[in-house]
Amino acid sequence: MIRRRPSTDPLRPGRLLRLRGAVDRIFTGLASGSILLIALALVVVLAPMLWRGATAVLFRGTVEFRLMQMQKFGRGNRADLAVELVQVAEVRQPVYGMLDRFSRGIATDDLEEEARRLYREFGKQLDRRDTPAQERTELRSLAKHLRDDFTEAVESTDKAAAREALGRVLRHADDPRLKGTVAEGFFRMARDYGHIVDTVDLSRRAEYAKALGEVRDAIRALFGPRPGEPRPPLVMDQYGATRWDMAERQLARLLTAEKWVEVQPGQPLQRIEVPREQQFAGTDLVPLFPFVRERAVEMLDPRLTFYWQYFIDDSLSGHYFGGVGPEILGTLLITVLAILFALPLGVVSAAYLVECAGDGRVVRLIRTCINTLAGVPSIVFGLFGLAFFVIFLLPKFGFPQGASILAGALTLGLLVLPIIIRASEEAIRSVPPTYKEAALALGASRLRCFVTVTLPAALPGILTGVILSVSRAAGETAPILFTAAVAIGSTAWPPWSAVTKPTCTLAYSSYHIAVGDRLAALVPHNQYGMVMTLILLVLILNIAAILVRSRVAKRLRGQ
Amino acid sequence: MAQAAGTVEARPRGAAAAFDRPLLLTPRENLAGYLGSHLGRAALFLVTATSVVAVLLIFVFIIREAVAFFVNPAALPPLDWTSTGSAFAWARAALSFIVARLAELLAGTQWYPEAASPEFGALAILVGSLYVTGGALLIAVPVGLLGAVCLSDILPFGARQAVKPVVEILAAIPSVAYGFFAVLVLAPWMQEHLHLSTGTNALNAAIILAVMAIPTIVSVSEDSLTAAGRELREASYACGATRAETMVQVVIPAAHSGIIAAVILGMMRAIGETMVVWMASGNAAQIPSPWWDLTQSVRTMTATIAGEMGETVQGSDHYRALFAIGLLLLAFTFVLNLITEHFLHRVRRAGGTSP
Amino acid sequence: MEARRIAVVAGLVAGATLAAWAAFAVASEASKQTLQIEGSTTVGPIAEAFAEAFMKANPNVQITVKMTGSGDGAAALIDGRCQIATMSRFMKPAEYQKAVEKNVTPCPHAVAMDGVCAVVHPSNPLKAITRVQLRDIYAGKITNWKDLGGPDMPIVVISRDTSSGTYEVFAEKVMGKDKMSEKVEYVNSNPQAHARIKTTAGAIGYVGLGFLDASVKALTVDGVAPSRKTIATGVYPISRPLFFFTNGYPELGSTLHSLCTFFLTEKGQEIIEAKGFVPLTNY
């Protein structure tokens, strides 16, 4: 007979028991792990958006930002700003000087255009001076030669040929007939250009022109339009880099050029970074770059800025500058209106379902319909809202046909109705029947009993429903896509005139700025800022309603 | 003082007068009250019926446009009521047209609504919805169920109070924010670290939808697990079972209706979600070629409607095809709703508390 | 009793506010003039910039801009929901028919020109492409860059969604009768396309002229590089005009007229150029 040898310690659990214990521990581990995973998901989703969105409000703002605030919103100390602007202009001046000197030799189109203009001006000047005809033709033809020689010098890529052509121009520099006339411009340009010929590698002029264009763009993006230039039409071009992080990006673009070079034939190109000093080596533009690198902070004067007005400002130039004030207002209006529509309907429906309805077939149908309404996808609500409220219903009441807050609020109200009904039903059902019985025993009618006893006791639960529906309504985009939302257009004030007009809301604008026009990628802080505002709004509404609920519950418990 | 039965007492004065009336008045005696109460109930009923009216309107509106997609009077032979032969021919032609359209919509894979000869094969789109929802459930159901188990049985009271808000906040985050995260954070991460050719694909959408569905699954499952009752658990423990065995073999089977309802509610949330899939799933109307490859772009029904509705001509075939897809979506969620209700009904009947 | 009285008073106040609400809503309609612009996501930014400049010059005009798609803009114009429909394609015959049914006469104003540029990731050594090759790529016949002389990488094909005007132009001028392959990925807008191509090494796509910058590389199509000059003269093969549609020609001197002819002013042309499109006139 084979007997199993017992383990030495009678209290030590057997193998099977240990296995079961291990399984139990693994199971507990998995379950706790999934809770941790859920919490991790929350952090991973919220953290980047809140973090990057915070840079929309707290950032290092430059003098351009303060200028923009002063000119567009009238904020800030005018005297201080003026002093700052003068200081900054002083530091920037050499940059423009260096740029001009170099570009005069590179921008051949400008030079040729200038030469042609000088020739025309000279001709007009001769007419005005009333010179005798023969002298006029002589001088005219001389000016023409000057112009053609100069153009030839500018267009040639051979230094010797260019120098020779310039020499031909400068030979007439001392001609007394041309003194005091516009034609002296030819000589000035020829001298400048001679300097360029000496320092610049003419064969690479086209390359220089392209790189110069990039440098110019970067400088314009950093410092805004030059003093003296006409004001650009778009607001976003009227100011330089308003934030230090934007400025740093532009500085990187200014100081290094990006090139894609072929390493092996048939393989993807590799990206290399060429410092601009190298790109412009040998020219007199080289000192520009270390100058800007060292004195960039002086040129822009960044300071830590707390731009809390982000939440109340209008947005400029399609969200490039400014804040999300109209969006917040629009979201609040549409949400409040939606709740105003849904709450009475929902509470009354819940009251009926709990108090008066039996379990008959009709009531089961009503419940099924409420559940169906809860399950309809939000885009279908949007379509329904467009066709029914916007096109069909509202024009019947005399409102102009078109998207409006009213239509959007009605659609959202329909969306949140099931949530309110469910929560109210729960709340009313959970009121202890002793309350109701006591009231009835004292002789109250059913209506009075409901209104004065059951409803106040159910208020915390109903408020829970309001919380859930408010955060749902504020965050929905699809229903308002076709019924209420616009991309630009500030919300009208006072509120009663706003309801017949469409508005921009946080949810829709967040979607629009993520997939909208090209500005989206240039202002990531605004993108994240808007989503952060939406999340904060929803969270604040939630917390406010939870506080109210707990206070009401406490008061009721105390009664 | 004892009164003789049948004698009428003198009318009491003052406050006691209020108790003189009999407790139950006939309608004739209290017409106002009777009318008030019944009219009031009727009014309440009408108000409650607005939700029915709303659902009916939605269905009517969608069906009206979708039906126009399946029925095209121009393609049918002329109808002559008088002759049965022509009536039958008409009916047969109409039926075959409807069937052909339905077959094309449900089984065709070519979705080219704006081409010169438009094709409306929505199978790839349906499959796309399926992939994204299936992937989401694959992730959300285990995590959600285990999370609910943890919440109901493992965590102490204090920890539970701390974890519940986390789940509620996850439910409250707007879908646009999730879409943002999917496109701007998750897609580049996937492209970089998983070396995929495209970061907006079915996997991306599935992960985000799972995160959105988890709160629903957790809260409804937790309610039904709690509703299973302490006695059941105590009995199991008394028999010597470990916690894992209790949960897996006793409690979860007892709460299975509620859990199935939770899963279906999560599924409905995932199917009906528009913004996230529109931004994050890549929108390629294809069935991924190794069928298990979730890292390819797919397109869902909701994204098709949202993306294409803006530019179609109202009343065109394309417009109606989109409504037909909307009808499919609506019908699907309606059926899921009915199933959920059935299970919740069973829970209510068995357990007592409604989830 | 107290609570009840308060409730009654609150109810009366709420009712009065709601009544005043309705009255004011109707009354204040007359004070400000409003214009609604709806339509394409490509032309929308132009309308947005115009609206901003216009509202700054005329403070008593309120303009709202909605961008959901060219077809939606056409439908809104026909239904009378907007005064200007921005469209990146011409109206289709079906839309004209519907307009005629509703007594609406759409009148087009071409405000700018746009070119659809084929772009790839900057690391792609390819510089030029022909329309035939482009068509084959989108139809799924060419699937690897090495077939075009590039590296051995699968081509990730990006397209705009089938209902966008940009897609229409591309389909009309490049695809012709061919259909796009199923593997093509669809994005909802120009910036999304730009972002996908910027971050995906093997991608090819098409965007409007205003979206060309240093982070994507534009290919020359049939030997012509997309630029202001080549699009304005029509040399670039895939170019198209952008439209504002109104119901009939707007009355001379009205706000609508000024807005529709804003593109002819110098400021309007500057705005169009600044937004990256090609102005119609050389000012």
Image (cartoon, grey):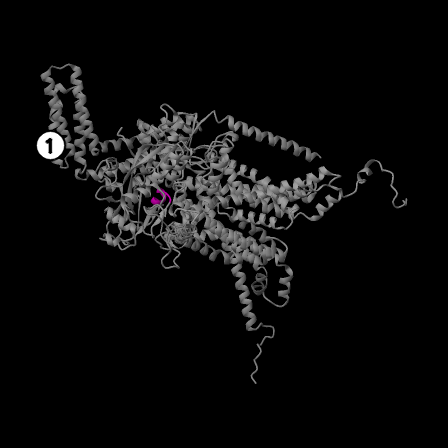
Say whether residue C121 is left or right of residue B84.
left
User: Bounds of the magenta span?
Assistant: C188-194
Say whether residue A332 is left or right of residue C261.
right
Labels in figure, total? 1
Type of residue at label 1?
Answer: Glu
For mark 1, give the secondary structure. Answer: helix
Say whether residue A77 is left or right of residue C233.
right
The image shows residue A40 at horizontal and vertical percentages of 49, 52
Is any atom of residue A518 visible in this view? no
Residue at the image position 11 percent from the left and 35 percent from the top: A160
Residue A77 in the image: above or below residue A445: above
Q: Main secondary structure of the magenta part?
A: helix
Q: Please tell me how crowded label 1 is: few (under 14), some (14-19), or many (20+) other residues with Cα within 10 Å.
A: some
- Nearest the viewer among C45 and A103 is C45
- Nearest the viewer among A318 and A194 is A318
Residue B104 in the image: above or below residue A231: below
Q: Quadrant of the C terminus of chain A?
A: top right
Determine which quarter of the picture holds residue A159. Answer: top left
Q: Chain of mark 1?
A: A
The image shows residue B166 at horizontal and vertical percentages of 53, 50
Determine which quarter of the picture holds residue A81. Answer: top left
Say whether residue B142 is left or right of residue A158.
right
The image shows residue A201 at horizontal and vertical percentages of 18, 38
Residue designated by label 1: A164
The image shows residue A350 at horizontal and vertical percentages of 61, 45
Q: Quadrant of the N terminus of chain A?
A: bottom right
Residue farthest to the front?
A: B82
- Nearest the viewer among A251 and A308 is A308
Determine which quarter of the picture holds residue A206. Answer: top left
Residue at the image position 57 percent from the left and 70 percent from the top: A17
Magenta span has C48? no
- Nearest the viewer among A435 and A188 is A435
